Image (cartoon, rainbow, N blue to C red):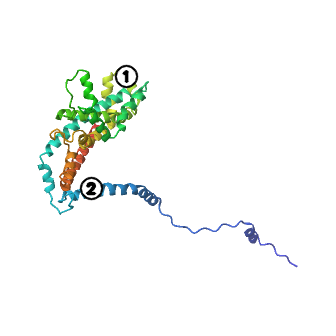
Amino acid sequence: MQVKAPDRAAAERRTRPERPARRPRTSRPPRWRSRTVQGLGYAAPTAVFVTVLFLLPLLLVGQMSLSDWPLLAGNRGGNAPENYTDVTDSALFWPAVRFTLLYTVIVTVVLLGLALLLALLVQESRPGAGFFRTVYFLPGALGLASASLLFWGLYSPTTGPLSRILEKLGLVDDPVSFLGTPTSALLSTVFLIVWKFAGFYMLILLVGLQRIPHEVYEAARMDGAGRGQIFRGITLPLLRPSLALCLLLSVTGSLLAFDQFFILTKGGPDNSTVTVVQLIYREAFQRLNLGTAAALSITVLAALLLLNVLQFRGLGRADES
């Protein structure tokens, strides 16, 4: 009987391991598309927050500024541009603008100068530097309204301790009214703001000083530069970003001043310390005219935007030079 030779191909197929069945290919979205969706998911809460709490109220204020809108009666229809002309025709508008600008200049110069001096004093890591940094910064942890109430009590000529201390020292004969004249009210409020915010601005400038490499100072000393030359040629130019931030914060905050004057002076004496934001409050909640208050708010917002743009352009040109 004839025996057939084994089929080699069949034997190889039996011994060869079976390959797993291939899964059908699924279409995956491009990587850029998934990253875009993920980024939109991260930005969505912030976008909703800004839209609800900023854009929508801004649109409403814009509508109010173009309408006759009493506080208790609601919208009575458009009256543009009557609200804007009423703002400029007010007897307190231009005095409030001048006073706000004067207050802004004084506070910015004194605050930034003192903050820079404090930052230079506590810049080096020496014994006691950490203690003084904390002491200088502590007033910044107090709210502005609380600080204003505190200084209102200190400035009181009848119950405040400052006037009594000056009398005991023999410096004055009668109780001192720190808020009784326009000049003293302005300077007393400036002292409050400087006391509260000097430590905060000192911290910003201190961070900027610590970012300056020590090698730059050592190279300047080796070249024979003095302290004044190092300060003018190295410290101030390299500290410009921190100074720009402090300048922006100080100018914006001073132009929007309200709490300190509302608590300390109520705009007095004789409306000499009325700020622009106080005018907005008076129009809205004392004269009950939301339309005029909204027009004044839009005017202040436009002025702040213009001022910030000019500041950024000036700082950008300074950096290029």
How crowded pointer 1 is (Cα within 10 Å; few <14, some 14-19, many 20+) is rated as some
Q: What element carries label 1?
A: helix
Task: Return the residue at label 1.
Answer: 221
For residue 129, side relative to residue 180 (left or right): right
For residue 217, side relative to residue 59 (left or right): right
Residue visible at 25% across and 33% down in the picture? 155
For marks 2 and 1, give the CA distance: 54 Å
Residue 58 is tagged as: 2
Residue visible at 73% across and 69% down in the picture? 13
Say what amino acid the circle numbered 2 marks: Leu
Residue 113 is tagged as: none
The quarter of the picture where the N terminus appears is bottom right
In the image, residue 71 above or below residue 183: below
Question: Is label 2 in contact with label 1 (beta carbons under 8 Å)?
Answer: no
- Give the mark count: 2
Q: Earlier in the sequence, mark 2 or mark 1?
A: 2
Residue visible at 47% across and 61% down in the picture? 30
In the image, residue 51 above or below residue 220: below
Q: Residue furthest bottom?
A: 1
Say what amino acid the circle numbered 1 marks: Arg
Residue 56 visible: yes
Residue 143, percent across and down?
33, 40
The quarter of the picture where the C terminus appears is top left
Q: Is mark 2 on a helix, strand or loop?
A: helix
In the image, residue 229 above or below residue 29: above
For residue 277, side relative to residue 234 (left or right): left
Q: In which quarter of the image is residue 211?
A: top left
Q: Quadrant of residue 15?
A: bottom right
Q: In front of the other: label 2 or label 1?
A: 2
